[in-house]
Amino acid sequence: MSAPFPDTATVQAALSLADRAPSMHEPPPWRWHVDDNRLHLYADSGARSHADPDGRDRVVSCGASLHHCVIALAALGWRARVRRLPDPTDPGHLAALEVCPEPATADDVALADAARRRTTDRGPYRDRPVPVTTIAAIASRLTPWGVTVREVHSVSRVRSVVAGVNAPSGGTTGLVDELDGAEDHTVLLTLGTANDRALARLHSGEATSLILLRATMAGLSTCAMTRPFEFADTREIVQREAFNDRASPQVLVRIGWPARG
């Protein structure tokens, strides 16, 4: 007897939520394939950008979609077991998901609801401090992925580097504006991994997704960024000052209270 597998409507609902994940690429660089008993995540080989020459942002974005899919399945009553990088001969095959029925918890449902409500907020945030306890509670959930979270205190230095060079992706004005907003009562976090290999990048995308959803559940606005790390000087500043040269910076996440509401 074959193992149970969700019906087409359930799979489509899960993948629809997976497609709501934040992407550092436009269009999103992931591709999902479903066979008789698994869901497979692939990096779209056609989603290449001159601003992402080594594909870091592509894999980070795919990691966010992977996490969105896992929480969507959980909310629909299916627990996923994830095999990351399952095929050594195909580096674009990032994950294979096997599922089994399991009742959804209230937290599963709340995370999926947050995924539906989450938006990227690049505007100014309210002049109200974010509780340290909220940030600590979110960061404490990242242990399974081996991702380290630190607050970036050298925002003005990062901004100066970005403003002083030409971005490979063409122009820095919008990016500088986003970093300007990180100098108020918002928190600018950076996610770091022990190395910069594909699995670490995938994990950092999953962790980014969780941070954004937990912040949304707490009523906070968020904006995930990787463009500042297009510049070697920016990466060096964050690596040295946030991680003491012990982790590779992957993503910046700005968190604060929404300007309205």
Image (tube, rainbow, N blue to C red):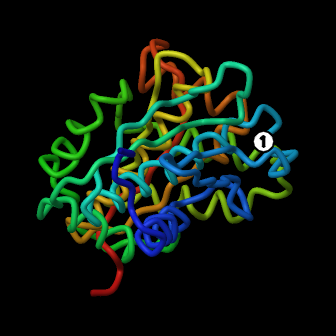
Q: Amino acid at mark 1?
A: Asp
Q: Position of residue 66 (x, y in %)?
A: 48, 48
Residue name at image x 29 percent, y 66 percent: 76
Furthest-bottom residue in this view: 261
* Residue at position x 66%, y 44% in the image: 42
Q: Residue furthest front?
A: 1
Secondary structure under tag 1 reads: loop
Residue 163, horizontal then vertical, whole percent: 72, 50
Residue 166 visible (yes or no): no
From the image, which quarter does the N terminus lie in? top left
Position of 75 compared to 94: left or right? left
Q: Nearer the viewer, residue 39 or 142?
A: 39
Which sits in the foreground, 117 or 120? 117
The image quadrant that residue 206 belongs to is top left
Residue 18 falls left or right of residue 139: right
Quadrant that contains the C terminus: bottom left
- Image height check: is 115 above or below 161? below
Closer-to-camera residue (240/211)? 211
Name the side, left or right, on which 195 lies relative to 70: right
Residue ID for mark 1: 52
The x, y position of residue 166, in whole percent, is 84, 47
Q: Residues within 10 Å of mark 1 (few under 14, many from 20)?
A: some
Residue at 78 percent across and 41 percent down: it is: 52
Question: Where is 189 relative to 216, above or below?
Answer: above
